[in-house]
Amino acid sequence: MTTLLCDHADEAVAGTEDGSTVLVGGFGMAGMPVDLIDALIRQGAKDLTVVSNNAGNGEAGLAALLAEGRVRKVICSFPRQADSWVFDDLYRAGRIELEVVPQGNLAERMRAAGAGIGAFFCPTGVGTLLTEGKETREIDGRTHVLEYPIKGDVALIGAHRADRMGNLVYRRTARNFGPVMATAATTVIAQVREIVETGAIDPETVVTPGIYVDRVVKEADPA
């Protein structure tokens, strides 16, 4: 597979279909692929299911996509924060669906999708509203609940650096969800701060191998 180096974020998100499940990286705004999200808004795909750690911050990035009414459902761990008023207003008005998933389960469900695991049992959330109606099993004297993988049609992730083959390295908390999302989606699109020549990144530091990455775009310079 050859990674496509895109000249603009609009080119990178082209072809995203209505009804897609979109995995959006970032830990708060750290690693949030804002250029790609803005391009997705311009591209016009709607009725989306968005999987992310939270439900948007302020009015930029993911929050801006929600404000445009393009998202049907959010799957996340932290839907409510001090600055998540866009999602909060939509949810209270009944205009968006929500599935809350414990943070570790969220990462593991995407990792399972990338690893080809059909399902797994986990004790997190047992006895709470989050696991009502789910299959359970006693394992080593402890109740576990059956969880299924989360697969994406598209993953939008932010990384620090890419080479021309699409190998990625991240910085700090931007690494939290990008690597598992890159294995769990059909089309993986990375926004990076810098694109370097092949061989300029030490293979020992590569976090996401280019075989997982379909398109790369350099983020726009700040105005």
Image (cartoon, grey):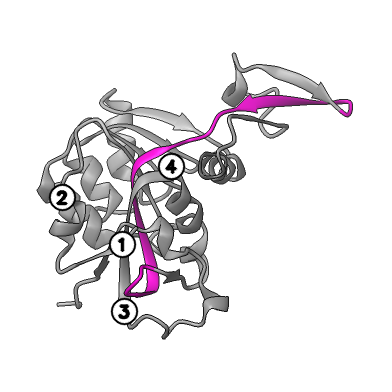
Within 10 Å of disc 2 (Cα), the crowding (few <14, some 14-19, many 20+) is some
Question: Which residue has dot 3 on it?
Answer: 194
Give the spatial CA distance, label 4 vs label 2. Answer: 31 Å
115 and 128: which is toward the camera: 115
Question: Which residue has dot 4 on it?
Answer: 80
Question: Which residue has dot 2 on it?
Answer: 14
Spot occupied by residue 189 in the image (x, y as percentages of width and height): 30, 56
**What kind of residue is marked 1?**
Thr
Spot occupied by residue 32 in the image (x, y as percentages of width and height): 35, 60
Tell whether 25 sits left or right of 110. left
Residue 122 visible in the current orientation: yes
Label annotation for residue 217: none
Tag nearer the camera, 2 or 1: 1
Question: Which residue has dot 1 on it?
Answer: 2
Q: Which stretch is magenta?
A: 140-166
Tag nearer the camera, 4 or 2: 2
Residue 60 visible in the current orientation: no
Q: Look at 15% across and 50% down and name the residue there.
A: 14
Lower sequence index among marks 4 and 3: 4
Q: Is residue 157 magenta?
A: yes
SS for callout 3? strand
**What kind of residue is marked 4?**
Arg
Give the spatial CA distance, label 1 vs label 4. Answer: 39 Å
Dot 1 and dot 4 residues touching (CB under 8 Å) = no
Q: Look at 14% across and 58% down and name the residue there.
A: 11
Dot 3 and dot 1 residues touching (CB under 8 Å) = no
**What kind of residue is marked 2?**
Ala
SS for callout 2? loop
Lower sequence index among marks 3 and 2: 2
